[in-house]
Image (tube, rainbow, N blue to C red):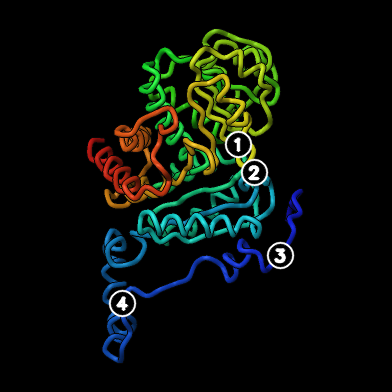
């Protein structure tokens, strides 16, 4: 198992450790077991009738088992939060937390599953073999570029929704914020020059979804600078990005891309010098989403940008995936969707954005992650998108 580079101080009496002691999940029965009659209904002999009916018509499993309201939250622990490769046991508290959010916001029973890492084919095979227990698969904290192939292969192989939240949840909430950002500033998506710092899971998904929403000028940067067709070191997903981004054929470091840019989306960590932020266009937007340390500190970003968003809860405009994934799965499960499609993601982003419209301002471009309206609104929008498709 990979060792964490972080060595936190272990204090079993601290509020954090006490909140996690014994885990954050349990199992509860949805039917009472009060005596022999209940036992005969819930287990033998009654259960045999249900099993035979499902064997004859597998679609009945969504109604007569918990499968129709159960999602697997799966990780191999190779890209956990900002901690990196800390292994499956290190990932387990995060997966449990995700399951708590599924239940709290959308009433979905989520099961955390962590597994030893392996090749793409090994992980796909393992996940596919346990998939009959679930109505959906939420992939989490799997390192790039493996995460792209794992998701793609599972989507081809399974007939239930598969969703890599690090990619698509981030992209959906970024788009929601940007939709309202342009409203506040009187701009339009097609006219924006957007720079995405990070070509991993989130960076690729943000780029693709913004393009689908109408953004025409996106420049993506990795640790070596601007991704362009002129670079000879690009392979795989980065080579594909080079064919559809950077329409002005820029070359060089991130600072070159930021000159005159309208939007910065940071999903890579690291630090952006203040002078590079200052070189952005007037009334720019900065989405510095690395957590807990944004690529640009919000106080610095505000000196040069009209709208600033982060991944943190202690600053305005928190871009938090919990705005997206509970409602997306709720809508997909309720509608019987077999896929999470681009149309569903766009519908989710618009639904999130609309909830902030009444109080829209530079410091309020997305609703609070704790807003109880969010998951139902996203669920309804996703279900409608399923029906329309």
Q: Which mark is residue 315?
A: none
Rendering quarter of residue 105: bottom left
Is residue 236 depicted above or below 32 in this figure?
Answer: above
Q: Nearer the viewer, mark 4 or mark 1?
A: 1
Q: Is residue 261 above or below residue 236?
A: above
Disc 3 or 1, which lies upstream in sequence?
3
Between 356 and 108, the residue placed more toward the observer is 356
Q: Nearer the viewer, residue 105 or 141?
A: 105
Q: Position of residue 260 (x, y in %)?
A: 55, 10
Q: Residue 76's x, y, as percent?
A: 61, 52
Query: What's the distance in space between the residues labelled 3 and 1, CA to CA?
Result: 26 Å
Answer with left or right where residue 113 lies relative to residue 226. Answer: left
**What secondary structure is found at the residue carrying circle 3?**
loop
Q: Which of the marked residues, 2 or 4, is nearer the chain's N terminus?
A: 4
1 or 2: tag closer to the N-terminus: 2
Q: Which residue is mark 2?
A: 82
Label disc, if present, on residue 290 of the rendered structure = 1
How many numbered marks, from 0 up? 4
Residue 42, given in percent of the width and then of the height, sits at 31, 80
For residue 11, the mark is 3
User: Which type of secondary structure does the marked residue at label 2 adopt?
Assistant: loop
Q: Marks 4 and 1, Cα distance to the nearest angstrom?
A: 44 Å
The structure residue drawn at horizontal position 30% and vertical position 60%, both measured from the top left corner, is 62
Mark 3, Cα crowd under 10 Å, few <14 / some 14-19 / many 20+, is few
Label 4 sits on residue? 31
The N terminus appears in which quarter of the rendering?
bottom right
Q: Determine the residue positioned at 62% across, 42% down.
A: 292
* Residue 387 visible here: yes
For residue 138, side relative to residue 179 (left or right): right
Quadrant where the C terminus is found in the figure: top left
Q: For the residues labelled 1 and 2, say whether their Cβ atoms are less than 8 Å apart.
A: yes
């Amino acid at each position: 198992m990979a060792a964490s580079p972080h060595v936190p101080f272990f204090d079993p009496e601290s509020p954090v450790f006490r909140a996690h002691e014994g885990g954050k999940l349990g199992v509860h029965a949805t039917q009472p077991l009060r005596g022999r009659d209940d036992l005969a209904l819930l287990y033998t002999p009654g259960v045999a009738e249900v099993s035979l009916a499902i064997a004859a018509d597998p679609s009945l499993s969504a109604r007569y088992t918990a499968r129709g309201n159960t999602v697997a939250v799966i990780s191999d622990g190779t890209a956990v939060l900002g901690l990196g490769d800390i292994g499956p046991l290190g990932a387990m508290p995060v997966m449990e937390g995700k399951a708590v959010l599924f239940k709290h916001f959308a009433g979905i029973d989520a099961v955390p599953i962590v597994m030893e890492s392996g090749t793409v084919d090994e992980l796909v095979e393992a996940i596919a073999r346990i998939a009959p227990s679930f109505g959906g698969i939420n992939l989490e904290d799997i390192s790039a570029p493996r995460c792209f192939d794992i998701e793609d292969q599972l989507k081809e192989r399974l007939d239930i929704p598969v969703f890599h939240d690090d990619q698509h949840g981030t992209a959906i909430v970024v788009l929601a914020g940007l939709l309202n950002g342009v409203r506040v500033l009187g701009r339009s998506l097609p006219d924006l020059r957007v720079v995405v710092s990070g070509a991993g899971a989130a960076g690729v998904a943000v780029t693709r979804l913004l393009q689908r929403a109408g953004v025409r000028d996106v420049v993506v940067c990795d640790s070596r600078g601007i991704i362009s067709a002129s670079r000879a070191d690009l392979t795989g997903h980065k080579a594909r990005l080079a064919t559809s981004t950077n329409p002005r054929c820029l070359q060089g470091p991130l600072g070159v891309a930021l000159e005159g840019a309208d939007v910065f989306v940071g999903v890579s960590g690291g630090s952006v010098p203040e002078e590079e932020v200052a070189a952005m266009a007037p009334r720019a937007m900065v989405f510095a989403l690395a957590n807990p340390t944004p690529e640009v500190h919000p106080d610095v970003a505000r000196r040069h940008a009209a709208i600033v968003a982060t991944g943190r809860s202690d600053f305005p405009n928190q871009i938090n995936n919990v705005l997206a994934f509970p409602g997306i799965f709720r809508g997909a499960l309720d509608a019987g969707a077999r896929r999470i499609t681009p149309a569903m993601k766009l519908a989710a982003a618009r639904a999130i954005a609309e909830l902030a419209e009444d109080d829209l301002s530079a410091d309020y471009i997305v609703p609070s992650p704790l807003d109880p309206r969010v998951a139902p609104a996203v669920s309804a929008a996703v279900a409608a998108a399923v029906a329309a498709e």
